[in-house]
Image: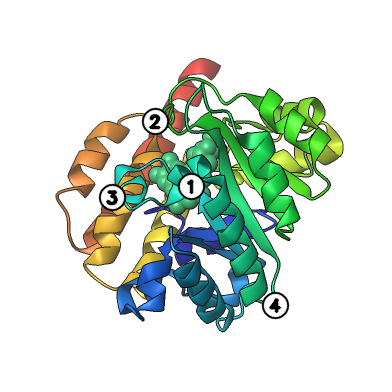
Amino acid sequence: MAGISDSPARRIARRFGADMTVSELISAEGISRDCRRTYDLARFDNLERPIGLQIFGANPESMARAASQLAELNPDFIDINFGCPARKIVGKNGGSSILRDLDLLAVIVGQVVKAVNLPVTAKIRSGWDSTELTYLEVGKIIEQAGAAAIIIHPRTKTQAFSGQADWEVIRELKANLSIKVIGNGDIHSPEDARRMFDTTGCDAIMIGRAAIGNPWIFNRIKRYLSTGEIPPEPSPRERIELAIDHLELNIEYHGMPHAVFRMRGQFCYYLRGLRGSNEIRASINRLLSPDDIKELLFNYIDKLSNENQFQTTNSVQ
Ligand SMILES: Cc1cc2nc3c(=O)[nH]c(=O)nc-3n(C[C@H](O)[C@H](O)[C@H](O)COP(=O)(O)O)c2cc1C
């Protein structure tokens, strides 16, 4: 996820049970022009493996060149983005706009597959809009062009994130393709994950938004799938401690002050639903020093623990 799934977030995801990770989307044009800031998006640590680097673009030659340049970083696979609905990407004819030009899509996948000695995967949506549901045709083209797997987020480009993901699309793709089909969209709990596997027959699942500030979802899903037990949610202390840990990883990776700016959005998710978290988030947004932020968060843990103790004592009486 652009702006979210950077190297620190991916490391945390792996630590908490994700079986593989994927980079934020990376501009093929930027890579083929050796743009340093674009290359920064492709940096990863071995702890994030198996990792895919995701590229987007509309020019087959640039896509192939970028894939081959990124292959030198030795990722585990290259993923092609045919799903992004953002104006910034679609406006340059990348992402989901390629779902409307199947000849171009075929050439891009074919050239990228030819350019690298790594598995190539493709991430798609169900189509441009409800009148252009091209996913089956797109899936077959991607398979024929030599991709190893397809990841489907079954919403259309025009839906963006509205409405519900239509999991029937995943089932149909799985029934019609022989490459691996990875289902994605609206998995928020271990029970959703089970239902996605059961109703679609997909080979694997991909979690996006539900993992933001909540990497516990990966191990909770795995435990539920293997034992049938639903593991407890993380405690407030665990959530706040991991938010601090994430801040430290960000400082190491992005440096200051970027690390603090980048973490502001993430703190929201780590603290969501905790008592008094709105004021804490507002205070964090006024702080620039990591030490001040950590002190605020450690005090917050103490405050929540004391309140809990007080409540427990009260309820015993
Ligand atoms: C902030 C944000 C950024 C995203 N960036 C990307 C991206 O760079 N590449 C991609 O393939 N999908 C991206 N997505 C889409 C997700 O990968 C996923 O397909 C979508 O959120 C549906 O899955 P979910 O319900 O598990 O979140 C992004 C989603 C969000 C919310």
* Between discs 3 and 2, the one toward the N terminus: 3
How crowded pointer 2 is (Cα within 10 Å; few <14, some 14-19, many 20+) is rated as few
Q: Which marked residue is nearer to the observer: mark 4 or mark 3?
A: 4
Amino acid marked by disc 2: Glu
Q: Is residue 274 above or below residue 101?
A: above
Q: Is mark 3 within 8 Å of ligand 1?
A: no
Query: Label 4 vs label 2: CA separation?
Result: 57 Å
Callout 3: SS: helix
The front one of 150 and 203 is 150
Q: Which residue is mark 3?
A: 264
Q: Which residue is mark 1?
A: 98
How crowded pointer 1 is (Cα within 10 Å; few <14, some 14-19, many 20+) is rated as many
Whole-percent x, y for residue 147 in the image: 71, 58
Q: Which residue is mark 4?
A: 117
* Between discs 1 and 2, the one toward the N terminus: 1
Callout 1: SS: helix
Q: Which residue is mark 2?
A: 307
Check contact, mark 4 vs mark 3: CB within 8 A: no
Image mark for residue 36: none
How crowded pointer 3 is (Cα within 10 Å; few <14, some 14-19, many 20+) is rated as some
Query: Label 4 vs label 3: CA separation?
Result: 39 Å
